[in-house]
Amino acid sequence: MSEQVDSFEDGIGYPDGGREALLARVGLYTRARLVIDAVLFVLMLYGYLPDISPDRWALLALIAVDAALVWGYRALARRGPIVGLTYAHLSRSALWITIGVHLNGGFFGGLSVLYLLIVLVGGVVIGQSRAGYALAGICAAFYLALAGIEASGLALPWYAPGALYLSREPSNLQVLVSIASVLVLSLFGTAALVDVMVRFVREQAYARREAQEQMAQVREESARLRSVVAQQSATLEHLRQAVSELAAPVIPVSEGVIVVPLVGHLDAERARRIIHTLLHGVARHRAQVAILDLTGLSAIDEAVAGRVVDAARAVWLLGAHVVLVGAGVEMAEAMADLEWDVDELITRGDLQGGIQYALSVVERSL
């Protein structure tokens, strides 16, 4: 079950691991980036973010260029190597974050936390093992390079307002090492969490997909078994009808005369089938006399006698005569105990006597 996507694990497409699933994740990421760029552009254009940069128009241009590059990355990803382009795109984003950190407070600035978003989002989008660690290494390299440049006084002062640079005193270098260590550890800690999350989601997705496949197999097997049961039920019904017909066959012995031998135990269901067969036999053969041969009946009691009488009366209602032959002592006693009026029933000791009587009835009707 096509199956509808009903979970996050299925939605990101990790079980497939194919190009289409990766393109879908890239599409989600780039749409989010374009929306963020659009919101930042509008906020900065109308002066809602005045303290981000000393040059608002420069940042507006950077945001517009970033949106164009994101759009270009999305277009190239549809034709080129997606993973390599994604690493290049995220590395470019990390570089721009590094420039933003330098322009807004140096490596002390709070914008450095955006490196964590690169690791988090990139690891989820790429979806490969160790992808988060690779991105953490790239971000750490940019940040440490920036910190080294600023600590060495190599950066141009007019690009960074305020006290961006450290003197080379040991205490200040210790601050640099502490801040850099915290950020690097945070980057690789985030990468570890992303790796665990991706592995967990992938395992859950595989488990869900396997469960769906097993459920599909179970449904197919259930449908096959239902089909087999239906076929067997139909076959069994045909066999029952055949057995019923064989157990009470309608035998035409002469024009207008049929014989129905009753054999075995006569329960309610079998009596219903025999009456059905007997009535159709009378109609089909246009019988004037129906002979019920009771010789083969077993376990004769009052209930069996009542069912025989019911069959005889059903035939009598069609206008045919009924002759009971081979009743025996037990049948006679059972029928004598009945409260029904059985005077209209004609009996003979054996089948030969019943046939002779039937032929005489047919001759009189001619």
Image: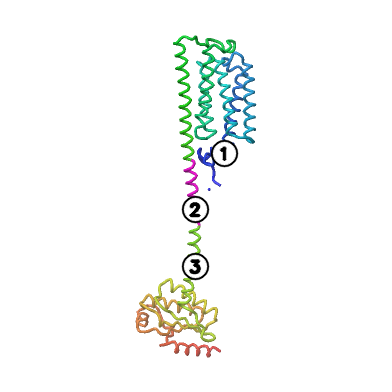
54 lies left or right of 325: right
Q: Earlier in the sequence, mark 1 or mark 3?
A: 1
Residue to which mark 2 is pinned: 219
- Main secondary structure found in the magenta portion: helix
Front label number (1 vs 3): 1
Specify the segment rendered in magenta: 205-223
Which residue is painted at 49% across and 62% down in the image? 230
Disc 2 element:
helix
Few, some or many residues within 10 Å of mark 1 (<14, 14–19, 20+):
some
Q: Is residue 51 above or below residue 205?
A: above
Distance from the alpha carbon under mark 1 to that under mark 2: 27 Å
Q: Nearer the viewer, mark 1 or mark 2?
A: 1
Which residue occupies the foreground of this view, 291 or 190?
A: 190
Q: Nearer the viewer, residue 174 or 119?
A: 174
| x, y percent for residue 90 | 57, 27
Q: Earlier in the sequence, mark 3 or mark 2?
A: 2
Q: Quote the CA–CA distance across marks 3 and 2.
A: 24 Å
**Tag 1: amino acid:** Ala
Residue named by callout 1 = 21
Which three-letter amino acid code belongs to the residue tagged 3? Answer: Thr
Q: Which residue is mark 3?
A: 235
Residue 80 belongs to magenta span? no
